[in-house]
Image (spheres, rainbow, N blue to C red):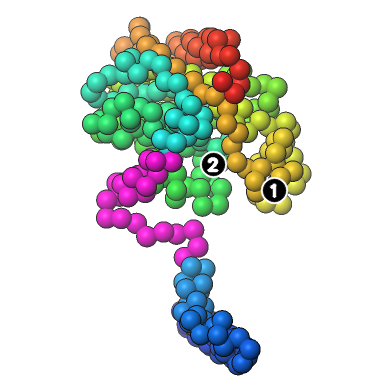
Amino acid sequence: MSEDRDQTLQELDAALDDLRVEIRSRFGGSAGREEETASIDWFEVFEELRRRANAFGIAERSGEVDEFGADEVVLARAQPVFDFLQDRYWRVDVDGIENLPDEGPCVLVANRSGLLPYDGIMISHAIHRAHPAHPLPRFLVADWLITLPFMQPYLARIGGVRASRDNAERLLSRGHFVVAFPEGMKGAAKLFRDRYRLQRFGRGGVIRLARDTGAPLVPVAVVGAEEVHPVLFKAETMARSFGLPFVPVTPTFPLLGPAGLLPLPSKWTIRIGKPLALDGLGGDAVEDELLISRLTEELRREIQTMVDDGVKTRPSVWG
């Protein structure tokens, strides 16, 4: 097996060498182009293209990368972009920062807004600006989103963490704020006509997480993010050939091609509520499925009420 691989690599290098000779002969043999090509080292251009092709989607990491992949260098470079999105593009109003604990971990539970995790990024960024001395807030990312090409490496570098009970517990034990979206895929894939209608919160994972770790459970309502990429309908037949659950059809995509992927400049509000009291959830009560279900539904209703209030009080979608 190793010998076959070595032979394949040798054949590839030989083919690249032949291509290099061909490039030199074509670009270097024309007298009429001597002045244009005199300052260009086509051999170096070719080598750079080959290097980038071999490392496509991979960037060099800094020395300061934590166990979940957050990269301090990438984060520092992304801060001006996040500041622009919060202050100028989406003009995000943040209410209720004072409801967060000054120290220690916290579980923030928010409504899911759209396919891409702009909501998690902006919640984490807004909290980090208000609590710069606190450990970096982390937002949980669903499995299906991580499978998208080149998505997982970048999300990890800016603070995204794959959603799992183990990852959440480890983050909380290190004092992080953790942003969770219990609606999951059902919330991310909502059509525009169903916007701001919270879907079922699964089986009470966030309730058990807060109970077992002792972290405060804080509801968060995001209004405005569901207009960033309004999904009119989902093309599922075409998506199967790409290995995707569906292809979203929006007013701008795929009509405008890649330009249609740009998010729209809607006006956002992030409202952070007061920590919820988990009364009666001590001792063996955590195994009471009816109690867990009731508390989960109460949490969903609380966030739904906050979302409804935000939608009613905003002047317009565009602010």
Which residue is situated farthest in the top direction here?
Answer: 280
Going by the numbered disc 2, the residue's amino acid type is Leu
Look at 65% across and 46% down and name the residue there: 259
Q: CA distance from mark 1 to mark 2?
A: 21 Å
Instruction: Tell me the residue that label 2 is attached to.
Output: 145
Look at 31% across and 26% down and name the residue there: 130
**Figure quadrant of the C terminus:** top right
Q: Quadrant of residue 82?
A: top left
Q: Which residues are magenta?
A: 55-81
Q: Nearer the viewer, residue 50 or 4?
A: 50
The answer to whether 233 appears left or right of 84 in the picture is right
Q: Nearer the viewer, residue 117 or 202?
A: 117
| SS assignment for the magenta stretch, majority | loop
Look at 67% across and 51% down and name the residue there: 242
Above or below, 88 relative to 63: above
Kindly identify which numbered label has been placed on residue 165: none
Instruction: Tell me where residue 186 appears, x and y as whole percent.
Output: 60, 28
Above or below, 151 relative to 197: below
Q: Nearer the viewer, residue 158 or 24?
A: 24
The answer to whether one can see residue 308 in this image is: no
Above or below, 33 relative to 257: below
SS at badge 2: helix
Instruction: Tell me where residue 256 appears, x and y as whole percent.
Output: 71, 45
Disc 1 and disc 2 in contact, CB within 8 angstroms: no
Look at 68% across and 27% down and name the residue there: 191
SS at badge 1: helix
User: How many residues crowd mark 1 within 10 Å: few (<14), some (14–19), many (20+)?
Assistant: few
Instruction: Tell me the residue that label 1 is attached to.
Output: 257
Going by the numbered disc 1, the residue's amino acid type is Gly
Q: Nearer the viewer, residue 83 or 121?
A: 83
Above or below, 140 relative to 103: below
